[in-house]
Image: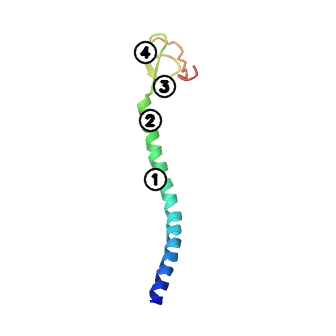
Amino acid sequence: MLIFDGGVCLSYSFLGSVARYISTEVRPTDKDKLNYLLSGSKDAIHDIRGNKVICPSCKCSNDIDAKFCSNCGEKLIIVCSKCN
């Protein structure tokens, strides 16, 4: 009976050290997985937001990196929708 009790106590103490070891080994891979998933979602958010700027003069759609309107030649100004 004493051998059984000793074995149970030993296994419980061993399980704690195994759990700590596994948690330190798994965390870095979880961080890598999360960063991988987030990097893919950045592109999706950019696609949803759109890559176009509307000319205030002629309402023509232009690329996000354009400095001047491709239709009328007016200078494009990107205005923040939150702070103008």
What residue would you read off at disc 2? Answer: 45
Colouring mode (rainbow / by chain / secondary structure / one colour): rainbow
Of badges 2 and 3, the one in the foreground is 2
- The C terminus lies in quadrant: top right
Q: Secondary structure at mark 4?
A: loop
Q: Earlier in the sequence, mark 4 or mark 1?
A: 1
For the residues marked 2 and 3, what is the alpha-carbon distance in whole angstroms? 15 Å
Of badges 2 and 4, the one in the foreground is 2
Q: Are marks 3 and 1 in contact (CB under 8 Å)?
A: no
What residue would you read off at disc 3? Answer: 64
Say which residue appears at 47% left-offset and 39% top-offset.
42
Depth check, front residue: 82 or 43 = 82
Of badges 3 and 1, the one in the foreground is 1
What residue would you read off at disc 1? Answer: 33
For the residues marked 2 and 4, what is the alpha-carbon distance in whole angstroms? 23 Å
Q: Vertical placement of 45 versus 70: above or below?
A: below
Q: Secondary structure at mark 3?
A: loop
Say which residue appears at 44% left-offset and 89% top-offset.
1
Of badges 4 and 1, the one in the foreground is 1
Tag 4: residue type? Cys
Q: Earlier in the sequence, mark 2 or mark 3?
A: 2
Q: Secondary structure at mark 2?
A: helix
What residue would you read off at disc 4? Answer: 60
Depth check, front residue: 54 or 80 = 80
Q: Earlier in the sequence, mark 2 or mark 4?
A: 2
| Quadrant position of residue 77 | top right
Give residue 76's position: percent from left, percent from top. Answer: 53, 17
Say which residue appears at 45% left-offset and 10% top-offset.
58
Q: Residues within 10 Å of mark 3 (few under 14, many from 20)?
A: few
